[in-house]
Image (cartoon, rainbow, N blue to C red):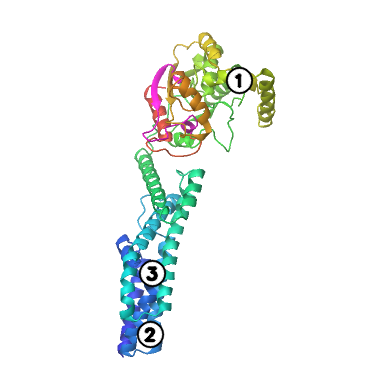
Amino acid sequence: MLSIILSCALFIILITITCLDIAKILSLQNKHFMYLYLIFAPHIALILHILNKYNSGLKINTVIKWIIFSEIIIFNLYIFIKVNIFPIAKKQINKIRLNIMLGGRQLVFYGLYSAFIQIPLYLFYIHLKQALSIPENIFITNIVIAVLTILTLLLNGMLRILLTSRRLNIIKRYIIASLSIIPIINIPVMLYACHTANLEYDHECYKVINHEARVDSQICKTKYPLVLVHGVGFRDLRYLNYWGRIPKELIRNGAEIYYGNQEAWGTTEYNANDIKNKILEIIKETGCEKVNIIAHSKGGLDARYMVSKLDMGKYVASLSLISTPHRGCKFVDYACKIPDRIYKAIAKFMNNRYRSLGDKNPDFYTASRQFSTQYSKIFNENVPDVDNVYYQSYATVVRNFFSDYVVCIPYLLLKFTEGENDGLVSIDSAKWGEFKGVLSNKHGRGISHGDIIDLRRDDYHGFDVIEKYVEIVSELKNKGF
């Protein structure tokens, strides 16, 4: 009779707790409950063995005993499976990727906690093994279950982080994945991954709060539409945007966006005509009087030439120049010393390639040499600023040789000849019109020539590239442009 009462009581308790959890009245994913659960869950074999001995003393019916054991095992599996699928109960923002990533962080913490808590427990079991007469097979089974529990939590957690974090590039993912299988070393590696995931989640929460705070505020709704002008070697492609996530955010905040659509390797003069035609098309289409131009790298030179030499000043309200080499790049001076036959062979190869990508008149030989300091000096003398057009400029810098492997070599050449730079353009070369300052972050990487256009679709510690463009455009709006 007692056995039936105990069995029914346990069944009712476990079913009630499960139903309350399913109804979200009670949360079995609560951290405090999970930390308590993870002390005992890996020792289910040992717990059942002790209960079996206790039940034998009470002479509980075998069927009732196995019903009780089944209830405990099923309840234990329910919690373990649920926490591996839904590691977090409370969510600050409703984004699947971010919640998967944050859940991964929580699972890694559970795994590490469970691993560390087992050390004193197993030391205790060793001393208790003789007193409780624990069979060898039960002890080994218990160890296997504990190891599988910890590995499942850690593997699930790390996979979630590695597959969803945008702050971990391909190289970092590979290094973290490789080091995570090495005992002891893997602990700081996993903690680093968790720290990165937490920073990314906080950053995204901040962005969501910003979006909600300025919903319908239209802070980027400028008087004149925006024309984004790309740099050298790229085209304005429909499905691979040169400007990354930036245009989408500007549009979300009220901006009207167009693109320059100039050639990837066209000369400054040729590209200026392309941009001119595009602006005239925009004016005809929208009925606006002028446009605001935001240009990156060589796009700034193309836009300056168009405004000054093609009589387009009356159609341009402002020209924002991002990392534009107004005074050239000294490493190009060295490149120009390559024997002309070799240089022209390289140019021919590049022209053929970019012609297949859509350029109508690529001229790598001339366009690349237009970055030289000598050409830039002549260019600046012949291309003066136009009155009534607002010119402003920004520079970017990386911290060291290892900041961005794509531009590490030109960074060194510029560092020794022109000083601080972003891997392609020095600070002094980027200054034009009203210089608005150097864009970087407070950490080791800095912001490279590609980072400032969201080339990697990445987030950088201490600097939000998307928010920077929102700030630039909102300032243009406030100035009446």
Location of residue 423 in the rendering, given as x and y in whole percent from the top left corner: 49, 28
Q: Residues within 10 Å of mark 2 (few under 14, many from 20)?
A: many
Location of residue 36 in the rendering, given as x and y in whole percent from the top left corner: 31, 66
The residue tagged with tag 2: helix, strand or loop?
helix
Is residue 451 covered in magenta?
Answer: yes
Q: Earlier in the sequence, mark 1 or mark 2?
A: 2
Disc 1 vs disc 2: Cβ atoms closer than 8 Å?
Answer: no
The residues bearing labels 1 and 2 have C-alpha atoms spaced at a distance of: 84 Å
- Residue at numbered disc 1: 367
Is residue 433 covered in magenta?
Answer: yes
* Residue at the extreme top of the image, as rendered: 381
- Residue at numbered disc 3: 42
Quadrant in the picture for the C terminus: top left
The residue tagged with tag 3: helix, strand or loop?
helix
Q: Which residues are magenta?
A: 430-453
Quadrant in the picture for the N terminus: bottom left
Depth check, mark 1 against mark 3: the one in front is 3
Nearest the eye: 12 or 220: 12
Location of residue 25 in the rendering, given as x and y in whole percent from the top left corner: 32, 65
Nearest the eye: 270 or 189: 189
Give the residue type that dot 1 points to: Ala
Q: Residue at x 44, y 66 (%)?
A: 148
Residue 297 seen in render: yes
Q: Which mark is residue 404?
A: none
Give the residue type that dot 3 points to: Pro
- Residue at numbered disc 2: 65
Q: Would residue 263 be found to the left or right of residue 74 on screen? A: right
Give the residue type that dot 2 points to: Lys
Q: Residues within 10 Å of mark 3 (few under 14, many from 20)?
A: many
Q: Residue at x 67, y 30 (%)?
A: 353
Q: Earlier in the sequence, mark 2 or mark 3?
A: 3
Q: Earlier in the sequence, mark 1 or mark 3?
A: 3
